[in-house]
Image: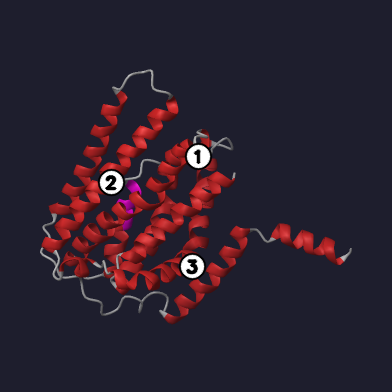
Amino acid sequence: MEAFEIFEETAELLTVDAVICFAGLIVFGVWLVRSGWGTKALADLQPRRNCMPVYLPFAALFLWFSAVAGALAVTQELPAKLADWQRVLLQNVVICAVSVLMAAVIILLARVTFVRGLKGLGLNARTTGKDLGAAFLNLVAIWPMVILAFLLTLMIGGLIYGPQFEMQRHEELKLLAEHRQAIVKVVIAITTIAIVPAGEELLFRGLFQTMIRSYIASAWGAILLTSVLFAIVHANAGHWAALFVLSLSMGYAYEKRGSLLRPIFIHLLFNASSVIATLYQ
């Protein structure tokens, strides 16, 4: 076999996912060794000081869901003459607008309830570059576990429902693949990659994880409980395992460094990879 043929076969084997998983296993292995299998990773960290009542994160979650459901219900009453792509575009604009509004509400609540306001919440523009780099490294480290979670879900689903079992694609990704209009793709991409991840991290990491951490001694316990909640509020049960693993990474990043920008960037990069993969396919 000639050298070129060997190179061609090797290139086919070394897919992007395989390379990322290999790099992730190395990074994750180094972290395990240095952190004593995670036991030393969050030792001696104090909860973020705040005066947040227990019900506040739940009230924010209920308000967000209610606002989105109400706004989408209104769009359903619009004239039937709207084309399907126009209705999808309008719905995503609504989701985007409501998410921005809720993010603003959460930021205002944090300014009142967190000691040191937004800095206490973990929003500091000066750390943006550092947090983006760390977020990429965190996502690479957790990527093999996310892939494993997807594979286990497929395996268990196949055992329960038979070989015809398939994981449903996220609704926004389906819409992204179905509609060819550029404006639809741009709005869905902005909503999925930037707006929704920022809002969700403000709510789940900023409010929920901080509130839970204030009442239990274990930082890992707060991360686990928040991750369970984060996974189950997403409608697609087939993605729960992967979302739970991803949430563990985001929760750890927040607790370890205290910067909310890190989990926001992890979430953003993860969603961006899904959007790019959908557009590429």
Q: Nearer the viewer, residue 43 or 133?
A: 133
Q: Residue at x 36, y 66 (%)?
A: 262
Question: For the magenta stretch, what is the residue range?
Answer: 227-232
Q: Nearer the viewer, mark 1 or mark 3?
A: 3
The amino acid type of the residue labelled 1 equals Ile
- Give the quadrant of the N terminus: bottom right
Residue 65 at x, y percent in the picture: 25, 41
How far apart are the alpha carbons under marks 2 and 1?
36 Å
Q: Nearer the viewer, residue 151 or 106?
A: 106
**Which numbered circle lies on residue 141?**
3
- Give the quadrant of the C terminus: top right
Q: Measured along the vertical axis of the image, is residue 135 above or below residue 232?
A: below
**Which numbered circle lies on residue 140?**
none
What secondary structure predominates along the stretch shown in magenta? Answer: helix
Residue 99 at x, y percent in the picture: 28, 46
Pointer 2 residue: 99
Residue 130 on the magenta span: no
Q: Residue at x 32, y 43 (%)?
A: 96
Assign a secondary structure to mark 2: helix
Pointer 1 residue: 160
Q: Residue at x 28, y 22 (%)?
A: 77
Which residue extends farthest front? 183
Q: Nearer the viewer, mark 2 or mark 3?
A: 2
Which residue extends farthest right? 1
Count of marks, rendered view = 3
The amino acid type of the residue labelled 2 equals Ser
* Mark found first going from the N terminus, 1 or 3: 3
